[in-house]
Image: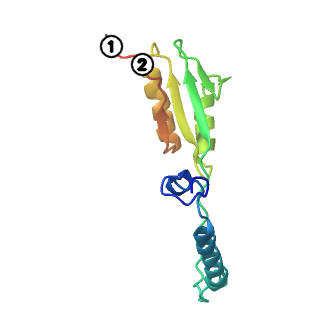
Amino acid sequence: MIGSGHGAGTASHTAPMSEINTTPLVDVMLVLLVIFIITAPLLTHAVKIDLPQASSQPLPEKPEVISVSIDADGKMYWNDTPMVDGELAVKLQQISKQDPQPELHIRADKETRYQILAEVMADAQNAGVTKLGFVSEPGQGKN
């Protein structure tokens, strides 16, 4: 009886099973595969409807940006090109007639006299420029 292997003290009956039974997993996967194969064609059918036609306006173009820079001495620059006296009013008249009207950005040195800025703003208003803005740089804050 010692060598027969049928006794109560043998190691083969008490050791846990070290292999995973994958047969149920494969069965479930095959069933899911069949279900997806059958239902996939049903999901591709769309409801046929007659949509209304509508006309819409195209989005307006972003307007051009014109930069007028004024240095500390009062010398003016149109998009970084130096200007002579009186040329600003002519150019402002030209841009006020464009459609869409360009945006006028004024960049002035901090030492520029207010009188010069007031004249530029008055010229822009007299020419009919409606989009005017001031450009500044963010400061570090006051200590």
Quarter of the figure that contains the C terminus: top left
In the image, which disc is placed on residue 142? Answer: 1
Q: Which residue is drawn at 60% across and 36% down?
A: 66
Residue 18 vertical position relative to residue 43 in the rendered view, above or below: above
Quarter of the figure that contains the N terminus: bottom right
Q: Residue at x 52, y 25 (%)?
A: 107
Q: Residue at x 52, y 43 (%)?
A: 129
Of 11 and 37, which appears nearest the observer? Answer: 11
In the image, which disc is placed on residue 35? Answer: none
Q: Are marks 1 and 2 in contact (CB under 8 Å)?
A: yes
Residue 3 lies, in percent from the top left, at: 61, 53
Residue 40 vertical position relative to residue 109 in the rendered view, above or below: below
Q: Which residue has dot 2 on it? A: 139
Classify residue 28 by image quadrant.
Answer: bottom right
Residue 29 vertical position relative to residue 19 in the rendered view, above or below: below
Mark 2, secondary structure of its residue: loop
Q: Are there few (<14), some (14-19), or many (20+) residues within 10 Å of tag 2?
A: few
Mark 1, secondary structure of its residue: loop
Residue 46 vertical position relative to residue 107 in the rendered view, above or below: below
Residue 18 lies, in percent from the top left, at: 58, 53
Residue 12 lies, in percent from the top left, at: 56, 54
Q: Are there few (<14), some (14-19), or many (20+) residues within 10 Å of tag 1?
A: few
Cα distance in 3D space between marks 1 and 2: 8 Å
In the picture as drawn, the residue positioned furthest to the front comes out as 1
Drawn side of residue 140 relative to residue 48, left or right:
left
